[in-house]
Image (tube, helix red, strand yellow):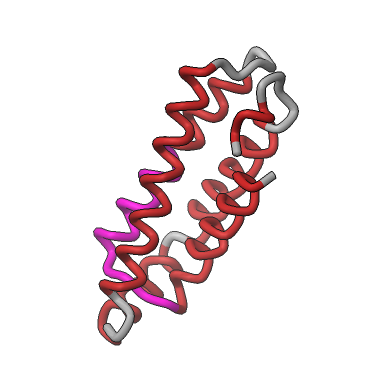
Amino acid sequence: MKKIAILLSLAAFILTLASCGGPEADAKKMVSKIEKYTEVAKAAAEDKKIDDAEIEQLKKLGEELDAFEKEMDTKYKDDKEGKEAMEKYMEDNKADLEGIYEEFFSAMMALYECEGSDKLD
């Protein structure tokens, strides 16, 4: 459950990037990290069992996402131009990003329906 809380807070951060800022390159990097996590989560949940290797990979990707989030918070805390660039990127790619976030959340939730999900914290 702790992992769900962390991932949900990460997703909330991503959703608020439109108002909190960041340049387009960093937005694309964050989306890429989310897509990678989603890909691994979907593959891990496919057989309804999560093995130790999958857990370690998911943990590593989750930590990378968290670290990147913290880096972006610090980097763009007072960057008005960065915020405006992020808002434009988010607006221009709204439909695609909504699909990415939806797939991310679905993949996360699927993990918790698997045997071994108790090891995800």
Magenta stretch prevailing secondary structure: helix
Magenta range: 20-36
The answer to whether residue 109 is left or right of residue 11 is right
Q: Position of residue 96 (x, y in %)?
A: 49, 51
In front: 89, or 70?
A: 70
Q: Residue furthest top?
A: 47
Image point (30%, 51%), residue name: 29
Image point (68%, 30%), residue name: 118
Q: Residue furthest right?
A: 113
Relative to 83, say whether 57 is above or below.
above
Q: Position of residue 105 (x, y in %)?
A: 63, 45
Q: Position of residue 50 (x, y in %)?
A: 60, 19
Is residue 29 found inside the magenta-colored segment of the image? Answer: yes
Residue 119, by quadrant, is top right
Residue 89, by quadrant, is bottom left
Q: Quadrant of the N terminus?
A: top right
